[in-house]
Amino acid sequence: SWTPASFVETTVNELKQKLGNDKVVLGLSGGVDSSVTGVLLNQAIGSNLTCIFVDNGLLRKNEFESVLHSYKDMGLNVIGVDARQKFWDDLKGITDPEQKRKIIGRNFIEVFDAEAHKIKNVKWLAQGTIYPDVIESVSVNGPSATIKSHHNVGGLPEKMNLKVVEPLRLLFKDEVRRVGKTMEIKQELLGRHPFPGPGLGIRILGEVTPEKVLMLQEADTIFINGLRNWGLYDKVWQAGVMLLPIQSVGVMGDERTYESTVALRAVASTDGMTADWVHLPYDFLAKMSNEIINKVPGINRVVYDISSKPPATIEWE
Ligand code: XMP
């Protein structure tokens, strides 16, 4: 029968066989799937694996530094690339969500490809694809292809002309987490909520600017840390904050303000295909609202999203 330990043993052996002395490149995202992929490959081929972690300027607050640090702690051979400015420049003036996804996806491929070319003789591209991704990309490419273009790095293998290796291809998310646990990856990393590839880029409705990214990062940190401190983080499948393109009137002291609104979102789900909004305690929501409005300049109103999927989606774009 399937156990995480036997999966690790078999997979590491298979990877050794398949890859021999070849060099492999892997994009890390900070998420569970790519991290587990990295650790498996590291066990199999060690320093013949080079990992690349791109800061696209749309990550959570301090995410780049802290995740890079954890990867180095785990012994991975990882290169961090600060490409923030490039992404921000290319997103200037863009408001259409699908357009943003395309630009972010294309930029990622460019940055990753340029970095990978600095490594001599790379033969393989590793990816953290898991079973639901395989199924979903079949349906995304099929007749009902009107859903969001989630597979934002789908063009990577073609562009790079590398062979692809996907050790988690047959696993579900919970199995990936169990495999990670067997390999002693920290629970902090394994228990993380999913986070979309285009990051805060699709949580800033309308045009993305560096100023809005910084504002949203502050609000998002308050919310996510709040969930952790109140023991709610693990009860929620995914959570985040949306910065809305609306200004509304408020008062601060004896001044009128005209500032931004954020929407908090927390959902329960098993696979992201359907989702229910979580009935977070009112006391917690009150606390979050106060803290965000008091601490984040530019935000004077907080709302809670009580829509389920379908017909709403988890993200707002
Ligand atoms: P929706 O908003 O469609 O999201 O209900 C379902 C899940 O997919 C994530 N998501 C994305 N992930 N690139 C990604 O890698 C994307 O463009 C993208 N759009 C949505 C979303 O965060 C949720 O987990």
Image: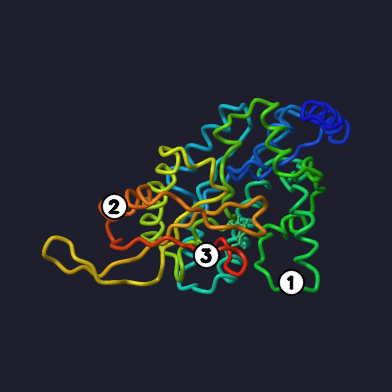
* Distance of label 2 from label 1 (alpha carbons): 41 Å
Mark 1, residue position: 145
Q: Say whether marks 2 and 3 touch (CB < 8 Å).
A: no
Extreme residue in the left direction: 254
Residue under the point 78% across and 67% down: 141
Residue 201 image position (x, y, % from top left): 50, 61
Q: Which residue is mark 3?
A: 307
What mark, if any, has residue 290 been given in the picture? 2
Q: Residues within 10 Å of mark 2 (few under 14, many from 20)?
A: few
97 with respect to 169 (left or right) = left
Kindly tell me whether residue 123 is visible in this rendering: no
Q: Dots 1 and 3: beta carbons under 8 Å?
A: no
Q: Quadrant of residue 79?
A: top right
Q: Is residue 10 left or right of residue 46?
A: right
Residue 170 placement: quadrant: top right
Instruction: Give the residue type that dot 1 points to.
Output: Ala
Q: Amino acid at mark 3?
A: Ser
Element under label 1? loop
Quadrant into which the N terminus falls: top right
- The quadrant of the rendering that contains the C terminus is bottom right
Vertical arrangement, residue 310 with respect to residue 76, above or below: below
| Residue 125, x across and y down, in percent | 75, 46
Earlier in the chain: of badge 1 and badge 3, it is 1
Q: Residue at x 45, y 65 (%)?
A: 208
